[in-house]
Structures are given as structure tokens and as C-alpha cells.
Image (tube, helix red, strand yellow):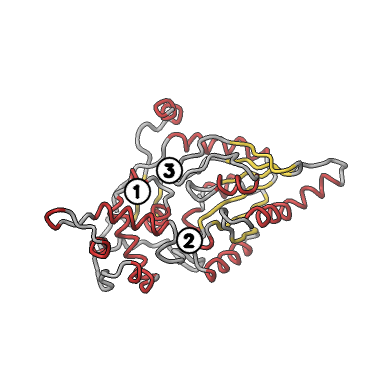
Amino acid sequence: MQTINWYPGHMAKARRMLEENVKLVDIVIEIVDARCPLACRNPDFESLFKNKIRVVFMNKSDLSSRESNKAWIAHFKSQGITAAELVSTSQSAKKTAVSIIESAGSPVIKRYREKGIRKVLRAMVIGVPNVGKSTLINRIAGAARAQVGDRPGVTRSKQWVKVSDYLELLDTPGLLWGKLENETLAKHLAYIGSIRDDVLDTEEIASLLLFDLMRLCPNELTARYKKLNAEAEIPYELLEGVCRSRGFVLSGGNLDTERAARIVLDEYRGGKIACVALENPTDSFDTEEGSAGGEDTDGQADWEADSPTNAEEWDERHE
């Protein structure tokens, strides 16, 4: 897979902001995409929030498999972390989320109550880009308090949101890390839209996604795109099959693979292809074997920061 430069300065600034504000909160709420919880978990978070009460909401759980969701919840529980399925766009999301947050924070409330202090529970909401943090906050708050978008990088600064007299949430920018060394997990982030499409080769990403889905849910995939070759050994051939399935043919008989790539990514992200997990707790991605359909020289997706590396310099250019 191609080398991708991805760590804009606003993310370096966001990390510093998290470090500065973690002392102000009682709970850290981590939002992950239920289809790939491991890829969504920024390794920096463990050291940043090791002394805080932790809650993981597996958002978009309706787009993953029920069996995988249950396995991940049990996995987090074994690590002392409360976890729950969630669909932030559903009507029940507010009741579910608030109940879990308040339950997790009850020891803090009790401790202050014993001292005669009326405690306002403060929770920081974190996650990689495009997993639904702001959507959940707006659902809980009952109003469009936080900026929302279907692309990564919409939230650029912290936003305090008052939910009730007893609960306040801190919305934070989505934070990736500077070097995505594991190729499989990097692909998963690209599949769900946590990395901006305009820094990706979308035809390559869509081809790899089709190749992975052919292994995970071949029946659903071939039902969606009826002219796929299930025996294809080269990912790009599957993208060409999507073109033939949808009639994406240009003048001269050339296939419009660029259009097909956009359609595949949009339909996967919207849950129109299949509800399937990309990762399970028993999976091991420590040893890489190169990209599907090709070889990778070092088994890594070396996605490092491009210049400028200075956060303030980047922000000045993009304000």
C-alpha cells in the first residue's frame, strides 16, 4: 500500500490539549467504530488516561456483527473498562449513554457527596476522527451543540457541553497518531473514513476493501455487486467487477474505476454492503504479510507527518 503522509499540525495541537485538560475531568469516554475497535484505539490514550475511569462506546454497532460486539465488550471488561454497544443516531442513544456514564461515575459522586459537596460529573469524549463523537454529544445534549460532519477533522477545538446540572461533556478533536505502522489497522482506518479520502489512493483502498470483504462476507458482497469474480486474486479486478455490475463504463469501453471506488467506500461506510466486523479480540495483527495482492517491503504502512511539522505553522496556513 502507498506511503501516506498524515499527521497535520492540528492533531499535534489536539494531543497537547488532551494532556492539559485530562486533569479537569472525572471520566474519559472513548468512542470507537464497532467494526474495528482495535484500529480506532489510539495507543497514546493508554498513557494519557491511565489513572482515569474509562468507558468505551462501540458506536455504529449496527454495522458490525452482534457476536463480535459481545466479544469486544467482554474483552474490555477483562481490562477493567466498561464497554457497550451504541448507535449514536438512534433515539435510545441518549438514555443508554447517560445511564452508563452516570453508573461509571457513581463512585466519584459518592465520594464527594460524603464530603458534603454537590459534584458535577465531567467527562471527556475522545476518539479517532469520524467515529461519531460529536453526533453522540448532540444526541445526549438534545441540540446541535457540537460540529458534525461525515469526514474526519470537523472538530478542531475543545467544546464544553452542559448535559444537565450534574453532567458536562468535553468534546475534543479526533486524534490519530503520527506513524501508523501496522498496515492492516491502517487499512481499517481508511475503510471507515478516519483518514481523509483526499490523501488516499481511493481506488487502491476500495480494491483492498473488496478483497477483504470477499473473505469476510462473500455472499453479501456478491449479492450487492453481481458481476464480481469471487476467485479473483488481484484486488483491482474486484473493483473492475463493480464497474461491470453497475454499468460504470466510459466512452471507448474504459471502466470508470474512480467512480466505482467512491461508491464502494460510501456504501460500505453506510452499512449497505454487509454488517460485518473487520476485527475480533482474538485477532493478531502483530505480524504483517504485506498488502493483499502485492508485497510490502517492510510490512508497514509508514504514514508519517509531512512538513510542516510545527503545529502552529500548520494552523496558520489552514485557518
Residue beneath label 1, please? 302
Horizontal and vertical percent for residue 27? 67, 47
> Marks 1 and 2, how far apart in space?
23 Å
Q: Secondary structure at mark 3?
A: loop
Sort mark 1 into few (<14), some (14-19) or many (20+) by Cα contacts within 10 Å: many
User: Is residue 319 shown left or right of residue 259?
Assistant: right
Q: Nearer the viewer, residue 29 or 150?
A: 150
| Element at label 2 | loop
Which-is-in-front pick, marks 2 and 3?
A: 2
Q: Is residue 160 left or right of residue 34?
A: right
Q: Residue at x 52, y 58 (%)?
A: 60
Q: Is residue 314 left or right of residue 27?
A: left
**Circle count:** 3
Q: Earlier in the sequence, mark 2 or mark 3?
A: 2
Q: Residue 102 at what x, y percent from top left?
A: 73, 52
Q: What residue lies at 58% left-to-right and 56% top-to-bottom?
A: 90
Image spot of residue 23 (x, y percent): 66, 39
> Along the line of sight, which residue is nearer the eye, 231 or 107?
231
Q: State the CA–CA distance, disc 3 to disc 1.
A: 10 Å
Q: In the image, is 240 to the left or to the right of 117?
A: left
Q: Are marks 1 and 2 in contact (CB under 8 Å)?
A: no
Residue on which disc 3 sits = 178
| Quarter assignment of residue 6 | top left
The image quarter containing residue 157 is top right
Three-letter residue code for mark 1: Asp
Give the alpha-carbon distance from disc 2 to disc 3, as whole Å.
Answer: 22 Å
Residue annotated with mark 2: 35
- The amino acid pointed to by label 2 is Arg
